[in-house]
Image (tube, rainbow, N blue to C red):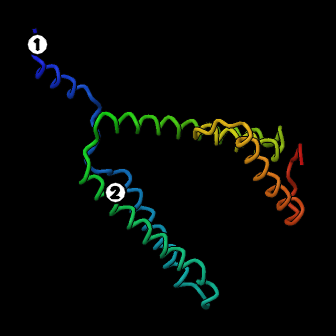
Amino acid sequence: MRSDASRSDHATDTAPRRPAWPIGALLFALALILAMAGYASDVASKSRGIADTILIVPAAAIGVVALLAAILEDIAAARRVAPDEAKAREDAAQTRASLAFMALLVAYVAAIPYAGFDAATVVFLAASLALQGERRPHVLLGFAVLVTAPVVWIFVALLSVRLPTLLF
């Protein structure tokens, strides 16, 4: 018969292992930093004046600073906390929710030509809220309609964008 210590050792051996450092996130952030800095540098070197760089260079600088802050936060978080079982379950639930949202987004884009931008957007927003945990029907439909109606109006009436619509 096994002792409790050997059972707990065995349980930790079969648990999924996570890297101590978020290597993928760090490399992705560094790649984005290089891309933003390179683009801003290229624009600045080829610009004819301040008008060419007034939006791009500051936006790239803000993006680089934000990504550096995110990298520092990821490093600090990796040093602070070792993942435990509850955290692993929470991460798995967030991963499932993210994948469900991505599938919902693909379905939304695929439905626009058939259901219309307005109807597809109402359904997408209501489903997104439901996916995030909202269960009150008046909030689901109210939010979806109150957001969709002005967006459709802005695109169709003000910007003269031709959209396939069904409701508005």
Depth order, front residue of 12/34: 12
How many residues crowd around disc 1 within 10 Å: few (fewer than 14), some, or many (20 or more)? few
Where is residue 117? Give x, y as percent.
81, 47
Q: Is residue 90 left or right of residue 111?
A: left
Q: Quadrant of the N terminus?
A: top left
Residue linked to disc 2: 74
Between marks 1 and 2 in the image, the one whose residue lies nearer the viewer: 1
Name the quadrant containing residue 59: bottom right
Q: Residue at x 57, y 77 (%)?
A: 56
Q: Secondary structure at mark 1?
A: loop
Q: Give the amino acid type for the residue marked by disc 2 in the picture.
A: Asp
- Residue 85: image quadrant is top left
Task: Tell whether 144 sits left or right of 67.
Answer: right
Q: CA distance from mark 1 to mark 2?
A: 40 Å
Place of residue 143 in the rendered image (x, y in percent of width and height, measured from the top left):
73, 48
Q: Helix or strand or loop: what does disc 2 sit on?
A: helix
The residue depicted at 41 percent of the width and 60 percent of the height is 29
The image position of residue 125, as x and y in percent, is 70, 44
Residue behind mark 1: 2
Above or below, 21 relative to 133: below
